[in-house]
Amino acid sequence: MTKAIALISGGLDSILAAKIIESVGVEVIGIHFLLPFQKKRKIKFYGINVVDVEVGEDYFTILRNPKHGFGRAMNPCIDCKIFLLKKAKELMKKYGADFIVNGDVLGQRPMSQNKSAMKIIEKEACVEGLLVRPLTAKNLLLTIPEKSGLVRRELLYDIRGRSRKRQIEIAKKFGIVDYEQPAGGCRLTEIAYAEKLKKRLELGPLKMDDVPFLSIGRHFFEGSWIILGRNESENKELEKLAKKGDLLIIPEFPGPTALIRGRAKNVQRALELIWEHSKKKKRV
């Protein structure tokens, strides 16, 4: 039986792409890559057989100097797609898959979903002709699965642009009525988050256990990476996340917990920041 690896982000487009290919008689193995900077969210897979694949520190290599640049923040969209498609191609052999599927729509995202970028992504990921984009296939060249008869082009779509009207219509056909809005699940597109990440990278190589800290607290990069909890909940979270080598400073008066990461331990500055943001100071 014909098999396909489908990249499932959790958004409507990737779910629809997988369901369309499944509906034409192809066995779909959904791959949901667990990326370091993904937001936590509840995802419905609508009967698709989905395998979670964790992505580790090798992902950080594309953040230093992405060949194709960043989006409006620190989102290396083109390099990210290349990275994930390379991973997907490696999984093809494991699952005996004949081709790869994703939810791209021509013209939907200006940076990574224009014809030029799509060609670059396929070429550099070494998946030329192997990547089927069911939602927009009729706007693109024939792929190997279409030429060989594994997938019939007339059963695919010609969607283009940013409108979601046709996707919503197709979703209804598959009984999909509950799905996330296309707000994006990647924190790298957020300006404030990207600024923190950029300053952290200036201190040295990023580690996996650094990532959770970027989502909480106030951050200061003054020779050390100092993180202050903004409330009791974040103070407790810092205590929970602290690892060997971190320095936790918990004040005896009402104020934020401070955590210092990295080799440099600017304790004096951390104490000053605790005082500056303490409730005790505000009452003086």
Image (cartoon, rainbow, N blue to C red):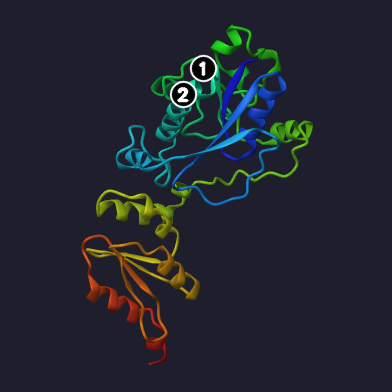
- Please provide percent x and percent y for residue 146: 60, 11
Helix, strand or loop status at disc 2? helix
Which of the numbered marks, if any, corresponds to residue 130?
1
- Please provide percent x and percent y for residue 74: 39, 46
Structural distance between the alpha carbons of marks 2 and 1: 9 Å
Q: Amino acid at mark 1?
A: Leu
Q: Indicate the quadrant containing the C terminus: top left, top right, bottom left or bottom right.
A: bottom left
Residue positioned 54% across, 46% down in the render: 185
Disc 2, disc 1: CB below 8 Å? yes
Mark 2 or mark 1, earlier in chain: 2
| Mark 2 crowd level (few <14, some 14–19, many ≥20, 10 Å Cα) | many
Answer above or below: position of 204 versus 130.
below
Q: Indicate the quadrant containing the N terminus: top left, top right, bottom left or bottom right.
A: top right
Between 215 and 244, the one lying in front of the other is 244
Answer above or below: position of 238 versus 137.
below
Residue positioned 60% across, 35% down in the render: 50
| Mark 1 crowd level (few <14, some 14–19, many ≥20, 10 Å Cα) | some
Q: Nearer the viewer, mark 2 or mark 1?
A: 2
Helix, strand or loop status at disc 1? loop
Residue positioned 66% across, 19% down in the render: 26
Q: Can I make out residue 265 in this image?
A: yes
Q: Can I make out residue 142 in this image?
A: no
Left or right: 60, with 22 as reference point = left
Please name the residue that numbered disc 2 is placed on: 89
Which of the numbered marks, if any, corresponds to residue 266?
none
- Please provide percent x and percent y for residue 29: 60, 28
